Amino acid sequence: MQTATHPFATLSPARVVAAIESLGFWLPGEPFALNSYENRVFQLHDDEGRRWVAKFYRPGRWSDAQIQEEHDFLSELDAAGAMVAAAWRDEAGCSLHHAEGFRFALFPQLPGQAPELEKPSHLFALGELVGAVHEVGERAEFQHRVRLDLDAMVREAQARVLTAPWLERRQRQAYERITDTLHGELQAYAWAPAQAIRVQGDCHIGNLLGRDDSFALVDFDDCLMAPAIQDLWMFLTAEHEAEWHMQLSEVLEGYEQHRQFDRRELKLIEPLRTLRLMRHSAWLVARWEDPAFPPAFPWVKDVGYWEAHIRQLEQQRLVLGQTPLWLA
């Protein structure tokens, strides 16, 4: 059910400007809303011509301590020379700010475009960037951020989707059956806690910006403790074996400029893909009361969407039983 009382419904442009100007900035124009659904993100510039990205965090999702760990990790990465956008801090060293019930942060806007994953030089650069991030990430552990847990997250996603009112009875039964099967098969892929390091967590090309062969990694909103492969597998998009191995070779060559990669983690690629598929549909269901979601994702209410999603999960079950490309 959509409601005007959703917290973000009160986040008007005037309130965004007032919140940012409360930090001592002066904005000569209105902020420009960027495509972001989990949080609300705005592009803006101040009277000195500096360009910023303001992120207003979704109320109730993360605790202040979890957000602060995101910011502190970014500061640690920035100090180490990794290409990231660290949160701006005021004279007191504060990076998480509050205004009218919202929590927000400012980040310098980084220019550039998304990488091209068919270019070997881009793949090498991405691997090198993630390797630099992970070299810092393994130095300590998050104390407040979550750990990537296949068992718990699959069950959480399943439970959320089964609350969706749009599934027909037959679809509900089919979805529960296939996700129960996937949950059982994923048990074989559990990893030891020692394998988990601090990672960006949502490392798709939309969160990478750059020019030529130099890129920066942005949006650490989903940073967590996880195996290193969590930040690498989405770069491996080729469908043909030879091209896939080329991508892997370039990414790992770049990565290992900074840190050795444990190739045993490659077996986690398809389990992580399975989890992402499930969590995406669960995310759409969980956020449906946010007024921004129905117009952006109208197909979620269609029977056809859930038919296709169930078929996709069935296909993923078959993939899990096949010899992975990295062993071929």
Image (tube, rainbow, N blue to C red):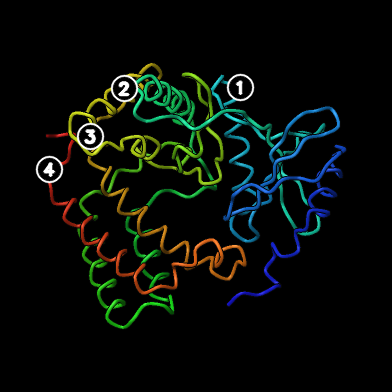
Query: What residue sits 34% from the left and 54% below the top?
Result: 275
Q: Name the N-terminal-most of marks 2 and 1.
A: 1
Q: What quarter of the picture does the N terminus occupy?
A: bottom right
Looking at the picture, how far across and down is residue 45, in whole percent? 77, 35
Instruction: Judge the density around disc 2: few (<14), some (14-19), many (≥20) Cα neighbours within 10 Å.
Output: many
Q: Distance between the residues labelled 4 and 3?
A: 14 Å
Mark 1 is on which residue type? Ala
Residue 250, numbered label:
2
Residue 79, numbered label:
1
* Residue highlighted by disc 4: 323
Image height of 72 relative to 254, above or below: below
* Mark 4 or mark 3, whichever is nearer to me: 4
* Residue highlighted by disc 3: 264
Query: What residue sits 31% from the left and 22% below the top?
Result: 250
Image side of residue 315 versus residue 36, left or right: left
Query: What residue sits 25% from the left and 74% below the top?
Result: 174
Quick one: 293 or 131, which is closer to the camera? 293
Q: Distance between the residues labelled 4 and 2?
A: 22 Å
Q: Name the N-terminal-most of marks 1 and 4.
A: 1
Mark 4 is on which residue type? Thr
Instruction: Judge the density around disc 3: few (<14), some (14-19), many (≥20) Cα neighbours within 10 Å.
Output: few
Q: Name the N-terminal-most of marks 1 and 3.
A: 1
Q: What quarter of the picture does the C terminus occupy?
A: top left
Callout 4: SS: loop
* Mark 2 or mark 3, whichever is nearer to me: 2
Mark 3 is on which residue type? Arg
Q: Distance between the residues labelled 1 and 4?
A: 41 Å
